[in-house]
Amino acid sequence: MSEAINKAVLESTQIAIMEQLPETGVPARSPLAHQQQTASRTAPENPGVYLWESALKTHLALRGDANNADFANGVEAATGLALPEVLQSNHNNEWALSWIAPDEWLLTGPGDQALAMEMSLREQLGGHYAVINVGGGQTLVRLAGPRARSVLMKSCPYDVHDRNFPVGKVVNTVLGKSQATLRRVGDDEWELVVRRSFADYIWRWLVDASQEYRLSLEQPTQGASKNRAGRLQASPVEN
């Protein structure tokens, strides 16, 4: 257990908090590390879809009453983010807070700040609440590019059209024969929270569904060309 843990917090809340990061020199492996290592790095010209894992991030599940001012104010004091409304998310440069259920939210951010953020939340919150580190059981997959929405349209039953799924919206939906939490990060970028046990299946599904759109298994660079609407630009896909 890390020395950074505040003993006063432990005594007052009567819970066990443990440092998740290994200190033995053993590298941590994400659920999709094997896919990233074996994937071809030869990107096609003008990719229509980018797919990559946002690996080893902090995942903290927050439970509480949104109508309780102490809970809502405590979350905002610790994270800098207000509790999002139903099916919405809020974010800053490092952290994203997504609505999951009527009394549940998911906080994601830098992997090396999990313990510090958990401690900050416990110091700010009181009463009936729960803060649970769920990072070991799930991962983040990012899908981007001008044809990313086309991939989702044939992968999940939920309507991902602009008029129904604006930037910032979050839903839990079926994806393939599994499930994912889908958040729209930008005009042409989506984030999927997937369970560890289904991560390989969902990755393979998305790879297969993206083939016709010229798939790149790398994160798009900041210099990627964009059209006037600010979307990632690609040439028309040949039939």
Image: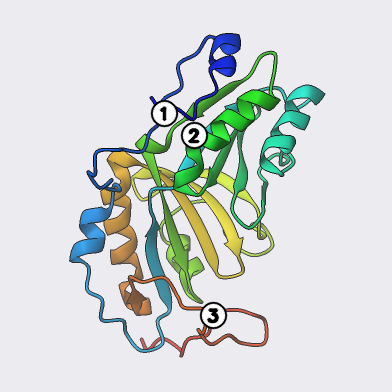
Residue type at mark 3? Answer: Leu
Identify the residue shown where x is 38% and y is 66%: 51
In x, y percent, where is residue 17? 46, 22
Q: Which of the two marks, 3 or 2, is nearer to us in this view? A: 2
Location of the N terminus (image quadrant):
top left
Q: Which residue is mark 2?
A: 115
Q: Is residue 68 visible?
A: no
- The tag on residue 232 is 3
Identify the residue shown where x is 41% and y is 25%: 18
Q: Earlier in the sequence, mark 1 or mark 3?
A: 1
In x, y percent, where is residue 99? 63, 39
Q: Are marks 2 and 1 in contact (CB under 8 Å)?
A: yes
* As drawn, 132 above or below 83: above
For this orientation, the residue located farthest to the left is: 38
In x, y percent, where is residue 217? 33, 70
Q: Is residue 113 left or right of residue 185?
A: left
- The tag on residue 2 is 1
Residue type at mark 2? Answer: Leu
* As drawn, 237 above or below 166: below
Q: Earlier in the sequence, mark 3 or mark 2?
A: 2
- Nearest the eye: 33 or 74: 74
Q: Is residue 140 visible?
A: yes
* As drawn, 61 above or below 57: above
- The tag on residue 19 is none
Image quadrant in which you'd find residue 164: bottom right
State the SS at label 3: loop
- State the CA–CA distance, disc 3 to disc 2: 35 Å
- Nearest the eye: 48 or 121: 121
Q: Which of the two marks, 2 or 1, is nearer to us in this view? A: 1
